[in-house]
Amino acid sequence: MRIPFETLQAEFERILLDLNFTAHKAAQIATIFAENSRDGVYTHGLNRFPVFVQYVKEGLVNPDAEPTPQEGLGLLERYDGNLGPGMLNARFCMDRAIALANEHGMGCVAIRNTNHWMRGGTYGWQATDAGCIGICFTNTIANVPPWGGVDPRLGNNPLIIAVPRKEGHVVLDMAVSQYSFGKLQQYRDAGDELPLPGGYNKAGELTTNAGEIMESWRLLPIGFWKGSGLSLMLDLLVTILSQGRSTAEITKGKAEYGVSQVFIAIKPNNGTQSADLIEQIIAYTKTSGLENPDNAIRYPGESTLKTRERNLKEGIPVDEKIWEKVKTL
């Protein structure tokens, strides 16, 4: 089932206005959710919207909250998100990082007590559209066991690295688990097997069954022990820089809220030399022989614009059950 972008956006906005968001905030949030689905990140677009609504109703997301400054240390600024909508707090922080980068060449903004930012890549694209390199990361509730362990003690702490490019920005948007929790839900609900093992079942066996992984809470970290170490370091950085809650503290709560995030913007030399270097790297990467002739080598973010173009033309594919549920909210 496909529906127009404007229909999806308008339905989100209607619901948000009923939840007492201001017209400005409702429009911004609705656009971000609709754009996530438009760009093919369905797990953090329509599919995630009912969860966001539930968090608002439970008081975990405060519609009226605004980020408040806590401290300024040169190129680093620190804010309290006051449990406001995570995607608006994140957009604000990246805007501040970009402003600092335009002034000083680099800017770093950390925020505590914020909420899920939905698609982290949104803020990488925000930075690149402003001509900046963007780096951002967040911690989460514990959902990944440390390497050698069986109990979740690490978050799958998403990391985004984005580089501006005239022919199409290069945007890496990844969780530190092999599959994000939202992607596991998508495969489980569709009854499909994962392309590669994504975690362990309760018997301690690697599996491609998303439902078994969600039941065991043993998501596989990327790169095995390396992903485990990266998750820990991201949690350390984001907690220290924001002076906010760590994965351990977040996990004590009844849900994932009050997380900590960091946003970095760097103003590069966007001259011909930099552009040539970027093209050289991408072109060399694509000279590799193909394992499967039908699967071309792609740089991070390459397929996003193609997906966006198709979904705007043909309509955004939606899960009919979730769409019907949203229309009743």
Image (cartoon, helix red, strand yellow):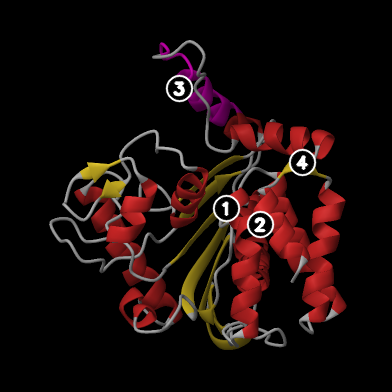
Mark 1 vs mark 2: in front: 2
**Amino acid on which the number 4 mark rests in the picture:** Arg
**Residue 33 percent across, percent down from the top left:** 70, 59
**Which of disc 2 and disc 1 is earlier in sequence?**
1
Distance, label 3 to label 4, CA atoms, is: 35 Å
* Residue located beneath label 4 in the image: 2
In the image, which residues are magenta?
276-290
Image position of 21 with respect to 175: above or below:
below
Say few, some or many: other residues with alpha carbon within 10 Å of mark 1 (under 14 / 14 to 19 / 20 or more): many
Which of pointers 1 and 3 indicates the residue nearer the eye?
A: 1
Q: Residues within 10 Å of mark 4 (few under 14, many from 20)?
A: few
Disc 1 to disc 3, C-alpha distance = 29 Å
CB within 8 Å, label 1 to label 2: no
Residue at 40% from the left image edge and 84% from the top image edge: 253
Disc 3 target residue: 285
The amino acid sitting under disc 2 is: Ile
